[in-house]
Amino acid sequence: MKLAQPAAALDAAIPAHLDKRLFQAPRLTADANGRVWLFLRHQWRSAGRWGGHLFDSYAMTLRGDAWTAPILLPGSTGRQDAMLAAVPADDERLVVAVVGDNRNLPAPAQAS
């Protein structure tokens, strides 16, 4: 598979309620149909009085020549050392494994 840079900038797809400067740890993969997926970790909240931060994982994919808006992966809230893995499944789906620590926190607020 040959990859090329899309015409639209990645940060153009990130909504205003998510600080684009806080995305990190990008991982690229492709599903069985060759669709490119990007997984990112987003830092969004301090984790208590002793510092540290919480992170959520998001997925984005290319549609045509532009990236989709980030899709929050449920159950992915966790610490900075949490990793993500994604592999194509036999039935053309993408299987994604995220490590969360069972926190039930509200999703980041979206601007109306």
Image (spheres, grey):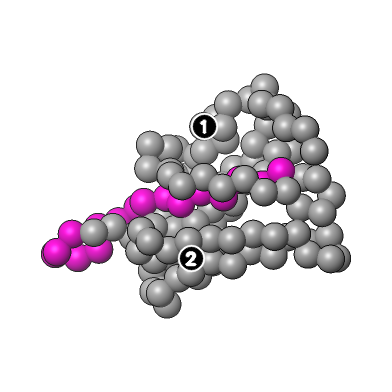
46 in magenta: yes
Q: Is residue 21 above or below residue 53?
A: above
> How busy is the neighbourhood of tag 2: few (under 14 within 10 Å), some, or many (20 plus)?
many
Question: Residue 26: x percent and y percent?
Answer: 51, 45
Would you say residue 110 sits in the magenta stretch? no
Task: Please report the residue visible at 64 percent of the width from the left and 41 percent of the height from the top.
Answer: 68
Asked if one can make out residue 48 in the rendered structure from this viewpoint, the answer is yes
The label shown at residue 11 is 1
Which residue in the rendered view is the most extreme toward the top?
Answer: 7
Position of 92 compared to 109: left or right? right
SS under mark 1: helix
Q: Which numbered disc, 1 or 2, marks the residue that appears first in the sequence?
A: 1
| Main secondary structure type of the part rendered in magenta | strand
Q: Which mark is residue 76?
A: 2
To which quarter of the image does residue 85 belong?
Answer: bottom right
C-alpha distance separating marks 1 and 2: 21 Å
Q: Are marks 1 and 2 in contact (CB under 8 Å)?
A: no
Point out the image quarter for the N terminus: top right
Front residue of 97/17: it is 97
- Picture quadrant where residue 64 is located: top right
Q: Secondary structure at mark 2?
A: loop
Magenta part of the protein: which range? 36-51
Q: As drawn, which residue projects farthest toward the front?
A: 1
Q: Residue at x 62, y 45 (%)?
A: 28
Farthest-out residue, left: 49
